[in-house]
Image (tube, rainbow, N blue to C red):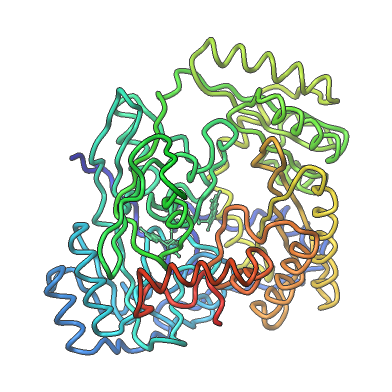
Amino acid sequence: MTAPQHRTPEPMWNAWGTASEADPLPEHLRALLTDALGVPRRDTPSVPRDQVRIRESALPDVARASIQDAVGAEHLHTDEHTRLLHTGGKSTPDLLRRRSGDADEAPDAVVRPGTHEEVELVLRACARHRVAVIAFGGGTSVVGGVSPDRSALPVVVALDLARLDRLLELDTESGTATLQAGLRGPEAERLLRERGFTLGHFPQSFEYASIGGFAATRSSGQASAGYGRFDDMVLDLRVATPRGTIRPGRAPASAAGPDLRQLFLGSEGAFGVVTEVTVRVRPAPAETRHEAWSFPDFATGAAALRQLARTGSLPTVARLSDETETGLNLASSEVGGSAPSGGCLAVTTYEGTAEHVGARHAEVAELLRAAGGTSLGAEPADSWDRGRFHAPYLRDALLDVNTLAETLETATTWSNLDRTYRAVHGALTEALGEQGTPPLVMCHVSHIYPTGASLYFTVACARAADPVAQWQHAKRAAGDAITSVGATITHHHAVGSDHRDWMVEEVGELGLDVLRAVKETVDPEGVLNPGKLLPPK
Ligand SMILES: Cc1cc2nc3c(=O)[nH]c(=O)nc-3n(C[C@H](O)[C@H](O)[C@H](O)COP(=O)(O)OP(=O)(O)OC[C@H]3O[C@@H](n4cnc5c(N)ncnc54)[C@H](O)[C@@H]3O)c2cc1C
């Protein structure tokens, strides 16, 4: 068993990441906000920590005693600071609430089990005492996945998996690794790289999100074209439930009935707590190469990506920004460099052996050129690569200067892509425009499949008096637009509480009954992450 050498730094309670990495918004971008979006120049900083309202812990003594028996008193925390750090995730509404001083939904306690068996004991204790349990990985959910919901059960504990941080096994012959659920992205990757392997899973939240969280949300990383989505990588899971343990996978492929792994991948802590994940790993790449491309417009670029996906000749990373996102990237000079103004920027990355990188690059470049692309060389793509994990800090800088910024995502078939793009773009523009805050709406494609692709929207506009309500109105309009055109309510952010009301459109009433039956079987007391994934009956 191998533990990581470096721990993930403690994240800020009111922003992404750590304070040492955060920068104020550059003056030229602030001026752009005023000129382009009419954002009044006003500072809107977070309240200081000592002005945050946190509810008193209401964990009953009898539940406290049972949980302490399971994990030891030193791993049960009811202090305000620890509970604040487990109050919700990192969506813009989550951050806005905490920045305004509202952490009233804080869990009643934070529990840190150290083994699978301890997780099981905690779940049993919570079922016995009717205490809700929120599995907590990196806390990077952007859909309300880790926000306490007290409508069914008044007492809530956050089950923080940080102590489950080992690489348990590496089978180099089969190319599999068994990782404990609490390992964060960088720690997992470091443990594998030291042994010559990579997971190849790099979501933008990589620096803080956990292995268990990736499995529980069916996460998709920026290199999904080359390495696949996280759920594609999973061979097996070890899942603790209040009724015992399930190990649903044992072979690379099987015809032994429906694939039970799929019930737990994406189950968002509502069906059980993932404590270990066995994943397929790949040899660490010997070479990495970046190349950026320009396309005359988004439709031409999307058609080029479709051809790539259809031929199966894929780079490791393939992403395409629409005209607005390309323009903003140039203006913010994050990806500027040698890119010409206008058109749409695409980024490609190739990883593997030198031979693979050379051959794959040649195939892809020929196809992109024939599809209307112009190579911009390595620099704009290098620049994207350097800045990609820093981008979330920009949102906090925007929130500081009277601006609302948030993202949402979907996926659909290639034939429905343009319709979905227009429907969501139009819905966001209208819903924010009618509140007197016309937005900048940007989009990119970053996950491609033979049959379709994801669309990821970023929105920025002046902040209204109640920015949470302002965004909720826009989000409702966008979600309705997504479902009305037959696209999915989420490609990789998961359901949480924010998307659960669209689950009936997503899977139908009978589909919801199937999911509810699973939950009732593994969690008869309903203590596992109440209010998430499934809408109330
Ligand atoms: C800036 C930013 C960028 C992001 N970029 C991406 C991206 O590129 N791709 C992507 O897929 N997502 C992205 N996300 C969303 C988020 O990071 C993912 O959903 C991630 O997989 C969550 O992992 P986590 O460990 O933080 O989980 P948490 O936020 O802790 O939990 C998420 C959900 O999973 C459940 N859960 C967590 N751990 C377990 C476990 N061990 N067992 C059972 N249930 C568990 C929780 O109860 C909750 O319902 C981004 C988020 C942010 C804030």
Viewer-proximal residue, 278 or 149? 278
Q: From the top left corner, tell me how far across and down residue 220 is, in percent.
A: 54, 46
Residue 94 visible, this orientation:
no
Quadrant of the snapshot with the N terminus: top left
Which residue appears at 31% of the width and 64% of the height?
A: 160
Quadrant of the snapshot with the C terminus: bottom right
Viewer-proximal residue, 316 or 261? 261
Residue 241 visible, this orientation:
yes
In the displayed structure, does residue 300 sit left or right of residue 6?
right
Position of residue 22 relative to residue 305, above or below, is: below
Viewer-proximal residue, 515 or 397? 515
Viewer-proximal residue, 503 or 13? 503
Which residue appears at 34% of the width and 56% of the height?
A: 274
Q: From the top left corner, tell me how far across and down residue 283 is, in percent.
A: 40, 23
Q: From the top left corner, tell me how far across and down residue 370 is, in percent.
A: 83, 19
In the displayed structure, does residue 48 sit left or right of residue 71?
right
Q: From the top left corner, tell me how far across and down residue 212 is, in percent.
A: 38, 53
